[in-house]
Structures are given as C-alpha cells and as structure tokens.
Amino acid sequence: MTVLPGDGIGPEVVEATLSTLDALDAPLSFDVLDHVNASAYRRSGHALTDGDLARITSGSAVLLGAFGDPALEDTDYVRSVLLRLRLEFDLYANYRPARLWQDRLSPLRDPSKRAVDCVIVRENTEGLYSGVGGALRAATPWETAVDADISTYHGVSRIIDFAFSVAAEKVCMVDKANAVRSGGSLWQRCWREAAERHPDKRASHLYVDTAAMKLVTDPTEFEVVVTNNSYGDILSDLTAALAGGLGLAASASLNPETGFGLYEPVHGTAPDIAGKGIANPLATVLTAALLYERLELTAEADALRRAVTAAIAKGRVTPDLGGDLSTREAAAAVRAEL
Amino acid sequence: MTVLPGDGIGPEVVEATLSTLDALDAPLSFDVLDHVNASAYRRSGHALTDGDLARITSGSAVLLGAFGDPALEDTDYVRSVLLRLRLEFDLYANYRPARLWQDRLSPLRDPSKRAVDCVIVRENTEGLYSGVGGALRAATPWETAVDADISTYHGVSRIIDFAFSVAAEKVCMVDKANAVRSGGSLWQRCWREAAERHPDKRASHLYVDTAAMKLVTDPTEFEVVVTNNSYGDILSDLTAALAGGLGLAASASLNPETGFGLYEPVHGTAPDIAGKGIANPLATVLTAALLYERLELTAEADALRRAVTAAIAKGRVTPDLGGDLSTREAAAAVRAEL
Ligand SMILES: CC(C)[C@H](C(=O)O)[C@@H](O)C(=O)O
Ligand SMILES: CC(C)[C@H](C(=O)O)[C@@H](O)C(=O)O
C-alpha cells in the first residue's frame, strides 16, 4: 500500500492513523511517499513524478491524507494530484458513506431523524470535472468561460450499476434532468435500464435541489444515493455534516474492475489548524477501515469502527468533537480500544 | 400585475393568496392568465402564446404559482415557461431569502444556530442552465452527452454587484474554482473586482461543497450568498429546508435595471397533494410580500410578514407545518391577522 500524507493536516492525521493501524495484525505494508506535497510542486512544478506513479502502481491501494495549499493557485496543484490519480487509475466510483457514530454528534433536532446511515456514490471521472473547457476573450471584460459537463453512456451506466451492487435495498438517483437536458436525459435512460437489471432493489429518483432538502429534512430515508461528480461533491459534504462533520467522513475512490482504490478522508488540509497537533485523525482511521473492508479484512475493519465508536462514546476525541485530546492522543485512544 | 397560477397546487395557493392580498389597500391590479398550464401545452405544444407574452410585458411583474406536469416530459414544458420567462425578461437575479419565522420550525438541534436569516442570490440566466449542449451518438450505448456551463464577465459581474447591493454587511461568494476551472477563474476575477468596488462590505469565499456543509452546521453565519445558477438552485433548497421547508420559501427573479420581476414560491406543483385543498399558501403569501417590498410598498410587505408570523405562532396553518387548516383557511388566518 502506498501512503501519500500530502499537505496541511494530512501528514499529522496519517502519521497518527498509521500508529493506530500498527496495533492490528493485518498483512499490509506501507510505502510512505512524504515528498509528494505542495512544496515539491512549488519547487519543481510537478507533484507526482513518474517514479512516484510507478511505486503507486505497484501497490494495490493508496491511503491519502490531504492535498492543497492556500498559497498556490489551488486549482492546478490539486488537479495534478487528486484528480490526476482518479483519472489515471480510472477510479470512477467515489464511495462516501455517512454514518452517525454517536447521537450527540447529529446537528438535527428530531431524534427519529438523526441516525443517518447512507452512502453517496459519486461518479468520479466525468461530468463537470472533465477538465474540458476554456475561455473566449479571457481576462477582458468580454470574457465568456465554458466548462463542459460531459456524461457518457459507459460512465453513467457503470456508476449506477456499482451503486446497485453496494445497496442492500434501495438506490436513489439524483440529477437535474428538468433543467440540464443532455446529461439529464442520458442519466435517465441509463437509470431506467439499470433499474431493470436490478429488479430486486428499490429504485427512486430526485432532482438535486429536492435531494438536498430531503437529506436535511430526513436523512434516514436514504440508503444509497448515486449521482454525478458535481452533485456528489456537494451532497457528500452535506451528508458528512449530518453525520457529525468532516472529522469523521471517510471516502474511497474505486475501480471495481481492477480492484485498485484511493482512500482519503473527505476533509482538506485545514490550514488554520495545520501543525498544531489538534487535527482529528478519526476520518483517516475510518478511511483505513474502508480500505480493510474492501480488501476483505472484515474483522479488522469492524474492530477499527468499534474502537472509534468507543473512543467517541468516552469523549476521548479532539476539540472539534468536543474533547480535549491532541491528534496523537486521539489516535492512541482508538488504539487502546482495539 | 400578471398572475400565472400554473399547474398542480399552483392555482390553489395563488387563489388563496389573492384573497389574502384583497384585504390590503395596495394599488395593484391582477391580470390572471389561468389558461397558461400543462393541459394547454399538451393540446397545442405551446404554453405561452405571443398574446400572453404581450400581456405579461405590459405589466410590471408576474406572480407565479407553480409549473410542471409529471405526465409530461417535464424538461421541455418547464423550460418553455419558467426558464423562458427568466431569459425573455433577462431576470438575472434570483433572490431567495431564507428566514426562520418560528423557532419550532427549525430542523436544527442547537438553539443558537437556528435563526437563519440569509439570502441566496442565484445567477439566473447562464451557467449550466444555458441550454447549450447536445449528444453524440444519442440513444446508443456509445452516447456522449454534453451540457455547457457558460459564464460571462457581464453575467457574473452584474450578479455579484447585485448581491453587494442587497447586503447590509457581508457577501459570501460560492464557486468550485478548485475543480471547474474556466468558470471558476472568471468568478474569482469578477469577485475580486467587485469586492474592490464595495470596500464597505465584508467579502468571503467558499467552495460549494464547504458551503453546503457550513450552511447545515451554522446557517446564522451567512447573510448574502452569491453563486451560479446550478449551485444557487441547490443551496436555496437547502436554506429553505433550514428555514422550515418549502411551505415558506419565497423567491423573486429580478432585472434590477428594468425593474421587472417574476415572483414565485420555490415549491413545485406537488402532484401528490394537488386538488386536495391542503397545500400551504404561505410561500406564495410571502412571495407577494417580496413583490410589495420591491415595489416599495414596504408597509404592506411588513404587514403581510407580521400576519404570517402571527398565524404560524397560533398554529393556524396547514398540515405540513403541524396545523390542520385547509389552504383557504390558512390564507384566511393570515388575512384575519392583517
Ligand atoms: C423547475 C426547475 C427547472 C427550477 C430550477 O432549477 O430553476 C426550480 O427547481 C427552481 O429552483 O426554480
Ligand atoms: C479538492 C476538490 C477538487 C475535491 C473534489 O471536489 O473532488 C474535494 O472537494 C473532494 O470532494 O474530494
């Protein structure tokens, strides 16, 4: 397994998580590439060298901290790491579970609606993230900027099929077919076809605005939500908020066919608290649990989650979750529960 | 003023609202075009005739109920009314206030974070709603569908300026410049320039995923949020949910230069309850309040809002807000408070 700690709080939460994982007897070895980061990019104009990519390719998964640098034109740097890896390995399925680990962490008032336990399945390789676009009369008062929102039958069908494959009972497809027509009608067609291929699962549909509203009103209604790259980005941050915030949000970018995966906490580099040793490592620990689950190390995945739940229940957590532990102490608290 | 009741619950909530407005001594007359609806569209293939457009043009505003028909290919019909009017009158500023009228209606747990009182200012004429796009190899397994997300310097600058003009203290611009580059960098440029033109207001920026999360975590942090057509669609449903749901969400599509406006509740046609006489008329009443405010009938606007607040406080509302009144009774309850 390759580890890319990255920038900001990335190295802190990754180091803490690795020390927790040490306590598990899992047959995994870690190849840590800590030179892949914003300062390397600033120096050389490249974040990932060919050598890095070769090392990544030789592993079966990547565990990532966070990438980004407020001092840089964020756009290019982030694209050259995160979005590049997603495309390079065709990691088309972004799997973002949201589960409330403890009632007290829910922002919702109605106790019967707090127990969110859903997954956003986000298409991860096309849509508005295609990178196709440009500007006419750039940098003038007559500029017109265009970004192409591209969907393919291949891309939409496979992500919807993946969503059905991970759902126990029901899948809700989210689009904006009533306003964004070309992609909308393709998603609708792929959706009808996929629903016919999976008659054992319940299939429903919402427009993205309604989905955002219903997720706040009652997230417990949802099991698997499948949607495009842009809506998935937004809705997965929304469900993360409903499940107690970014401090606990794990994610995996998968290619179900090759089995390769990129595992990353949903949070970013958090420059405001970077270097202070107070970043919450639990999202990274839960991301590791996703990795173990995907590698069929189910016992290890369950053990990690139980340990996280126990640490949260005892309040042995970082300040963002109401505790007073440091990053290392919070990781040690999980380790103590293993 | 032209009134377009539309489809589903549209005619019910509009009729009830007009009966409430009757009680005000405002110098407004209403030209009701109730033949503009889905059945006309199904019969003739047109929803708005040239004659209708001429009548609409001769007024200074339109009050709209809701448009849509689940039996139709929603896409074309809705576009031909709602999106057409927005474009025809260049109603580029979609103004969507979210205000919590009563504490009990908030879905949020923390009392100190419930009192949302913000406005989403949504660009309403470009972005992903441009209608520019198409499909290659449509209806085959090799389809590629493209929708253009188009932003212009003209369009972005004017909506950001509008946002500053309606803000008392602060404006937050929301985009996704770290992934959607061409539009993102144009929005960033227009934003920097506009912030310099309005040094008296506080200017901040969030990526759309973070904005969705922060709105749930603490909506009271926000005053005016300005964003593109697609993100504005999503975030305004989100803020509506935080302010007690679509039953209370008002909106206006404005052209600040001509003064023309289209006023509509954010909710749709609600086919499941249409014709039952239980739809909540308050979003339409509050939409009328927006109209009065914009026409500088401030006393009337305030009176309507006070009456709505009083009716809600007494529980004299429809079932969606926990009452047991019909649409007409709920409108009468507001009227009784005027
Ligand atoms: C019906 C739909 C096209 C419309 C939109 O997205 O603009 C609606 O959701 C709204 O927000 O007014
Ligand atoms: C950093 C950014 C480009 C990225 C995305 O939008 O994909 C992040 O928000 C995420 O969700 O992983």
Image (cartoon, coloured by chain):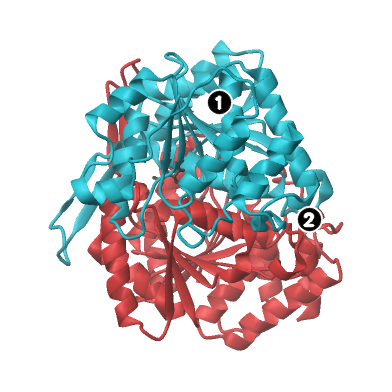
Chain colours: A red, B cyan
Disc with the residue nearer the chain's start (2 vs 1)? 2
Seen from the viewer's position, the closer of residues B300 and B207 is: B300
Confirm or reject: label 2 Cβ below 8 Å from ligand 2.
no
Residue A123 visible in the snapshot: yes
Give the Cα distance between marks 2 and 1: 33 Å
Q: Which chain letter matches label 1?
A: B
Seen from the viewer's position, the closer of residues B50 and A48 is: B50
Q: Which amino acid does label 1 sit on?
A: Leu
Question: x and y percent of residue B116 in the render?
Answer: 71, 40
Residue count near mark 2 (Cα–Cα under 10 Å), binned few <14, some 14–19, many ≥20: some
- Which residue sits furthest left? B137
Residue A5 visible in the snapshot: no
Quadrant location of the C terminus of chain A?
bottom right
* Circles 2 and 1: CB atoms closer than 8 Å: no
Relative vertical location of residue B153 with respect to residue A48 in this rendering, above or below: above
Seen from the viewer's position, the closer of residues A169 and A241 is: A169
Relative vertical location of residue A158 with respect to residue A183 in this rendering, above or below: below
Q: Which amino acid does label 2 sit on?
A: Arg
Q: In which quarter of the image is residue A152?
A: bottom left
What element does badge 1 sit on?
A: helix
Question: x and y percent of residue B149 in the render?
Answer: 33, 39
What element does badge 2 sit on?
A: loop
Is B80 on the left or on the right of B95, as rendered? left
Q: How many labels does the image show?
A: 2
Question: x and y percent of residue A117 in the render?
Answer: 62, 72
Relative vertical location of residue A167 with respect to residue A272 in this rendering, above or below: below
Residue position marked by numbered label 2 in the rendering: B109
Q: Which chain letter matches label 2?
A: B
Residue position marked by numbered label 1 in the rendering: B291
Quadrant hosting ligand 1: top left
